[in-house]
């Protein structure tokens, strides 16, 4: 079975290299630019095949995602020539750490680098020209969301399953910092030509938050606590 998988991977790599060389001879693409991406992709596939064999090989998802991310960055750089291509590396790494947790949920720690990598991918993909405080706002809010999600993950310890409380502390601190930077960025937007759409977006978010908490309170209150019509 292992030799068969190795043969399949080697066959795909050989066909891809041969196809690139053929396209180079036909002056369709420059094959030399895509050879490194193909090598990284092949290495990533090898690690993912190791990852898929057993639960003990959860570690292979990390180098596999790194190699696939590098292949995606090189390919995107050749096709688009934009800086946002670097976001693919962070996205693939985030997916790799997510796979580590999904394969073995005892590896709850993998959710922290997963959230960090996803936040960095969003920051790298941001368009230029945004207010200076936008990047730190997204960074701190993304990290706060990461620890907030971590506090919801059930962890088995001492024979029972419980949720961790300590992630709420860094989540709260990071959220406060993110809100401060976010308000500064919003103030810069409101002071310019973006005042009307910024106010409309903030008002819409406020209405959604209000509707969510109002519905949440109605679902969790007992019938005797909903007011006079239900107190009889």
Image: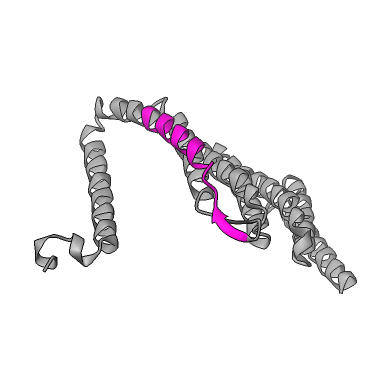
Q: Which residue is found at the position 19% from the left and 64% from the top? A: 224
* Residue 76 showing in the rendered view: no
Residue 223: quadrant of the picture? bottom left
Answer left or right for 187 relative to 11.
left
Task: Give percent across and percent down for residue 157.
Answer: 64, 55
Query: Where residue 190 sits: x, y (%)?
Result: 25, 29
Q: Which quarter of the figure has residue 19?
A: bottom right
Q: Give the range drawn in magenta.
A: 160-180
Q: Which residue lies furthest to the front in this view?
A: 232
Residue 57 is one of the magenta-drawn residues: no
Residue 5 coordinates in the image, percent (x, y): 83, 70
Q: With 88 as the anchor, is 59 left or right in this view?
A: right
Is residue 93 positioned above or below 194 on the image?
below
- Residue in the foreground of this view, choosing between 25 and 101: 101
Name the residue located 61 percent from the left edge and 54 percent from the top edge. Answer: 98
Q: Residue at x 49, y 37 (%)?
A: 169
Rendering quarter of residue 18: bottom right
């Amino acid at each position: 079975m292992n030799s068969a998988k190795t043969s399949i991977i080697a066959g795909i790599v050989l066909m891809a290299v041969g196809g690139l060389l053929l396209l180079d001879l036909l002056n369709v693409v420059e094959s030399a630019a895509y050879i490194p991406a193909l090598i990284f992709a092949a290495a990533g596939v090898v690690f993912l095949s190791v990852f898929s064999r057993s639960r003990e090989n959860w570690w292979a998802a990390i180098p596999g995602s790194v190699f696939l991310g590098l292949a995606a960055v090189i390919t995107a750089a050749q096709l688009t020539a934009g800086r946002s291509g670097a976001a693919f590396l962070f996205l693939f790494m985030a997916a790799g750490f997510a796979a580590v947790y999904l394969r073995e949920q005892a590896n709850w720690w993998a959710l922290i680098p997963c959230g960090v990598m996803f936040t960095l991918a969003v920051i790298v993909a941001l368009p230029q020209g945004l207010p200076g405080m936008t990047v730190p706002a997204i960074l701190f809010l993304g990290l706060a969301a990461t620890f907030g999600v971590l506090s919801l993950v059930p962890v088995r310890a001492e024979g029972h399953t419980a949720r961790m409380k300590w992630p709420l502390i860094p989540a709260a601190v990071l959220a406060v910092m993110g809100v401060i930077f976010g308000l500064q960025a919003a103030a810069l937007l409101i002071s310019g030509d973006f005042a009307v759409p910024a106010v409309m977006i903030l008002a819409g978010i406020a209405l959604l938050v209000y509707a969510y908490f109002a519905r949440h309170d109605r679902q969790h209150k007992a019938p005797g606590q909903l007011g006079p019509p239900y107190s009889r």
